[in-house]
Image (cartoon, rainbow, N blue to C red):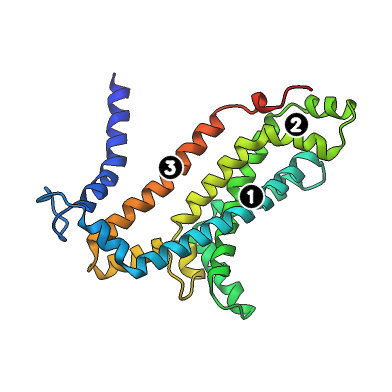
Amino acid sequence: MVLRVWVVLILLFLFIPILLIFFYAFNTSNIQSWPIPGLTAKWFGATWADENVRAALVVSLQAGLTATVIALVLGSCAAFAIHRTAFFGREVISLLFVLPLALPGIITGIALNAFFSFNGISLSLLTIVVGHTTFCIVVVYNNVLARLRRTQGSLLEAAMDLGANGFQAFRDITLPLISTAVVAGGMLAFALSFDEVIVTTFTAGSQSTLPIWIYGQIRHGVLLPEVNVVVSFVILITVIPVVIAARLTGGGGIARVPAAR
């Protein structure tokens, strides 16, 4: 009983501040105080009418989707290479893939900024994508590698014995087995990319994503109602893919292998 109460208290401590953001998004006043004087939806229209918000949203979506696609390709290929081949230093290379996620974002951001400056590369949407891909690869890599380690090698061997070539075995056996892990990795990568602010700050230049816009407006303290609306939107865009990814990775992939024909 005591443990259950403790768990509830911890959950309330974590989620009450987030719920307050949603309430403030409907606040009739532009001053954040509690209790709120009333509820209104006018700030949602005002936020959408703000050109800076729409521009930041476009940049966030472009950077997040592009980084996710690149991370899916590179992360999946890296997972296959690590899982299917045995060579000296494999665990060290695996550690290097995971390292960008373990490093503080400010370290990665400063390192990327120094690299771009040293090579004379102007900060733009491309540099944001490169920065986001560095940690998005890790998420895809971990998901795909974990699923590959749970697959049964006998399935591939049976497919080869039945005359399937490498591509056919990948298409009919491996891909169905790892499909949910790939999708989950892509969703987690997009969620991480969409709300990333530290690495983006060092790689964005004149570009502005939604997290950077939020940070700038909080410093000025002028458009706090719009900030609450944007923060609520970012929370939803971030949480929904994470929840779906958790549901996808919760089940196995054996049932997705096509039946023998």
Which of 249/41 is in front? 41
Decide: is 148 above or below 201.
Answer: above
Residue 173 circle label: 2
- Mark 1 or mark 2: which comes first in sequence? 1
Circle 3 is placed at which residue position? 240
Q: CA distance from mark 1 to mark 2?
A: 19 Å
Amino acid type indicated by mark 1: Leu
Residue 98 circle label: none
State the residue at coordinates (36%, 65%). Answer: 53
State the residue at coordinates (61%, 27%). Answer: 252
- Of the 4 image quadrants, the one containing the C terminus is top right
Point out the frontmost of discs 1 and 2: 2
Q: Is residue 259 left or right of residue 32?
A: right
Quick one: which residue is furthest to the left in this view? 37
- Mark 3 or mark 1: which comes first in sequence? 1
- Mark 2 or mark 3: which comes first in sequence? 2
Q: Locate residue 147: give its quadrant.
A: top right
- Tag 3 secondary structure: helix
Amino acid type indicated by mark 3: Ile
Circle 1 is placed at which residue position? 72
* Residue 234, x across and y down, in percent: 38, 53
Crowding at dot 2, Cα within 10 Å, few <14 / some 14-19 / many 20+, comes out as: some
- Tag 1 secondary structure: helix
State the residue at coordinates (61%, 52%). Answer: 137
Q: Is the residue under label 3 in contact with that under label 2 (CB below 8 Å)?
A: no
- Tag 2 secondary structure: helix
Decide: is 49 above or below 36.
Answer: below
Amino acid type indicated by mark 2: Ile
Q: Locate residue 152: give its quadrant.
A: top right
- Of the 4 image quadrants, the one containing the N terminus is top left
Which of 147/183 is in front? 183
